[in-house]
Image (spheres, grey):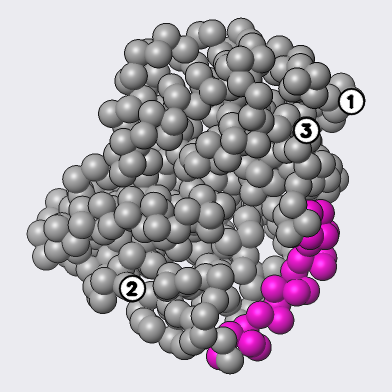
Amino acid sequence: MASVRRLAALFKELDDQLIACMRCGFCQAVCPLYSQTGREADVARGKLALLDGLAAEILDDPAGVKERLERCLLCGSCAANCPSGVKILDIFLKARALLSGYLGLSPTKKLIFRGLLARPALFNRLLEMAPRFEAIFSRPVDELLGTSCSRLASPLGERHFRRMAKEPFHRHLPELNTESGASGLKAAYFVGCITDKLYPDVGRAALKVLEHHGVGVKLPALQACCGIPALSAGESRTFAQLLAHNLERFDPEGFDYLLTACATCAATIKKMWPIMAVGLPPEQQEQVRLIADQTREVSQFLVETSLINGEAPADQGNGKVVTYHDPCHLSKSLGVEHQPRRLLAANPEWRLQEMAESDWCCGMGGSFNLMHYELSSAIGRRKLNNITQTGCSAVATSCPACMLQISDALSQAGEKIAVKHALEIYAESL
């Protein structure tokens, strides 16, 4: 019990945030996981009650609390609909860090986070080798989606996964530094791991769009992960290393905006970096604050700066049908919803057909997909049904992680619907 008391003492910093929850249950109606399981411990209210019990030393099972806390998509639906304004994601991430620090990481997670992710050069080299072995261990399933499935029994299970890019974005363009053009603006570009290694065409579309609008681009070499996988796992040490690595490469004095085409990276940099930078020296805290203030998702930037007006053409009646999925980290965390749609409307060859529940989580949730694939797939099938009911030729979104999840669902269902980033569709019109 003494060891639990020590953990409870660490949780004291969360006390004020935990007691703000009124247990009203509004989170139940919007939680994708609760909609599948109906379990109180799977909804935000139930998880906060467990944390409260641990902090008050009523519970003496930190490992069990950690397991329940990790059964979460971190989609932010609960926080976005909380009438008390409880910062639920902040609490969950801090609690995961405290519990992981107390219980320690498994050897596998230590290898992944500290041995690989925290070492960007090594991480890049190893994943660059992956395409050479994919043909041995996997077989193509759908060329339109670029998906494969495992040939043999595999930890990847039955999922249909996106094949690794033959040339990652960082090989195509290691670094770049162009002067601002007609816009008079200079932007740093944060690539993101999934764009770099799986969807390099998204990165190329982003740079094409910025060049077209006369925006100078600073693309630093050897960027690291934004840190959200480590942060979600409660691995503070790796997150701190990744943050320090990226701070060395992004000097906010050298650009007007920091842009990314990844909703998750945008939300992490803008929301999580400042929260997790509290223990850094004052000058680094200020650097993080400035970068966070400058961070925008690309469509948000284009609309905010009036570089596009995005008005729909007068006649879109014969255009190919595209529907749009709102990424949780973009719509719920950053409030960016109409901006990607304005990009889609700017391409006269496509006609936007809204799907039902466009902002309902696709079920990806990063590591949640790896740890709870059956639940992740069940949530994904709800999104799949909403997509197919629109009769679309393509589904667009603004998050490469969502693109992975939606591609898996479409591929397994045999649906011939392309998955695109909103920037790719806009870039087609330029």
| Number of numbered callouts drawn | 3
* Amino acid carrying mark 1 in the image: Pro
Dot 2 or dot 1: first in sequence order is 1
Query: On the rendered image, what quadrant is the C terminus found in?
Result: bottom left
In the rendered image, residue 280 lying in the magenta stretch gets the answer no
> Which residues, given as a range, are shown in magenta?
110-135
Dot 2 or dot 3: first in sequence order is 3
In the rendered image, residue 128 lying in the magenta stretch gets the answer yes
Q: Are marks 1 and 3 in contact (CB under 8 Å)?
A: no
Location of residue 184 with respect to 65 vertically, above or below: below
* Amino acid carrying mark 3 in the image: Tyr
Left or right: 283 as drawn, with respect to 224? right
Query: Where does the image place residue 240, in percent across and percent down from the top left?
Result: 80, 40
Q: Which residue is mark 3?
A: 102
Q: Residue furthest front?
A: 1
Q: CA distance from mark 2 to mark 3?
A: 41 Å
Q: Residues within 10 Å of mark 2 (few under 14, many from 20)?
A: many
**Which of the labelled discs sits on residue 411, or is there none?**
2
Query: Where does the image place residue 25, in percent across and percent down from the top left?
Result: 34, 19
**Which of the labelled discs sits on residue 18, or is there none?**
none
